[in-house]
Image (cartoon, grey):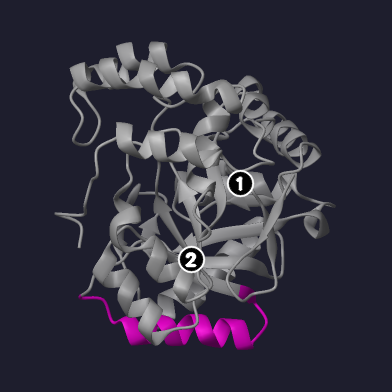
Amino acid sequence: MKKNQVGKSGLYVSALTLGCMSLGTDKKKAARMIDEALDAGVNHLDTADLYDFGENEKIVGEAIKGKRDQLLLTSKVGNHFDKDKKDWFWDPSKDHIKNGLKESLRRLKTDYLDFYLLHGGTIDDPISESIEAFEELKTEGYIRAYGISSIRPNVIREYVANSQVDAVMMQYSMLDNRPEEEILDLLHANSISVFARGPLAKGLLSNHSAEKLKGKGKDGYLEYSGEELQNLLPRIEEQTRESADLNALAFRYVLQHPAVASAVFGASSLEQLRENSRANVSESLPNDVYLELQQLTKRLTYNQHR
């Protein structure tokens, strides 16, 4: 599988990333799914301390035992949680970021992370303090690179201007093209890479599009009504002639922009894992197909989330 450099880090991630949030709690099944992803060429796993209140990190840690040198590992911090009460609050403080990493490393059974991301954030955060925490962790050798997981343009701009972030994780798909309007070019110009989560738009852009449209899609998606999706999705599917299936088309669409280093997919079953990890993303979309997809879809912008 093609690999792309992330920012200026010197780290190269596979074009597809396995998002581990949906792996479930069956350790054997999770380990098999991660093994199959690695066999398919996926070298990047994404988790977060908040997923199942730390349990997801533990499961991932068990699954990668003996394989740590074969993969790149991302986790996230910022949600100060109480596992027993199943409750959390936002805490981007320096102390929490540094203490949170120690706990994540313990659960993941590793002594470093390849990427450490702030799991959200607002413009009212003590941003300079958060940056200082990540910079210290990088200097100390506990993380190799850092970034943020955010869809807020104003927050992203602060990190672009004031930090050495190598990556931003954000929601991005054909149906959620908001990053195209004001973020992707900015990041690319500053040698910062994107991990695009949600490229299949809750399955609406997957090979099971018709089924998802009857369920999650019947009430619409973002600024699309259910009726609009019914009319649009078959027209999008017509463009799969160059990419074999809709999954691959959706992945290749977000990977088309040079800022995007990897498309992050989730999987709750081996079937989903195989379908996603084996999608052909080795080639770019033909330019006419890419432009046609852009013309078919609405141009969305960030309104509430700034």
Could you tell me the amino acid type at mark 1?
A: Thr
Foreground label between 1 and 2: 1
Question: What's the magenta bit mostly, secondary-structure-wise?
Answer: helix
* Amino acid type shown at disc 2: Leu
Q: Which of 188 and 136 is in front in this view?
A: 188
Q: Which residue is drawn at 59% across and 66% down?
A: 115
Residue 38 placement (x, y as % from top left): 76, 42
> Residue 14, how many percent across, how many down?
68, 51
Q: Residues within 10 Å of mark 2 (few under 14, many from 20)?
A: many
Residue under circle 2?
Answer: 117
Q: Note whether 233 is above or below 91 in the view shown.
A: above
Tell me if residue 53 comes above or below residue 26 in the rendering: below
Q: Does the magenta stretch include residue 138?
A: yes
Which residue in the rendered view is the most extreme toward the right? Answer: 66
| Vertical order, 245 against 211 (above or below) | below
Residues rendered magenta in the picture: 124-144
Sequence-wise, the earlier of marks 1 and 2 is: 1
Displayed quadrant of residue 237: top left
Which labelled disc corresponds to residue 101?
A: none
Mark 1, other Cα within 10 Å: few <14 / some 14–19 / many ≥20: many
Q: Can residue 21 be seen in this view?
A: no
- Determine which residue is flagged by label 1: 17
Tag count in the figure?
2
Distance (Cα) linking label 1 and label 2: 15 Å
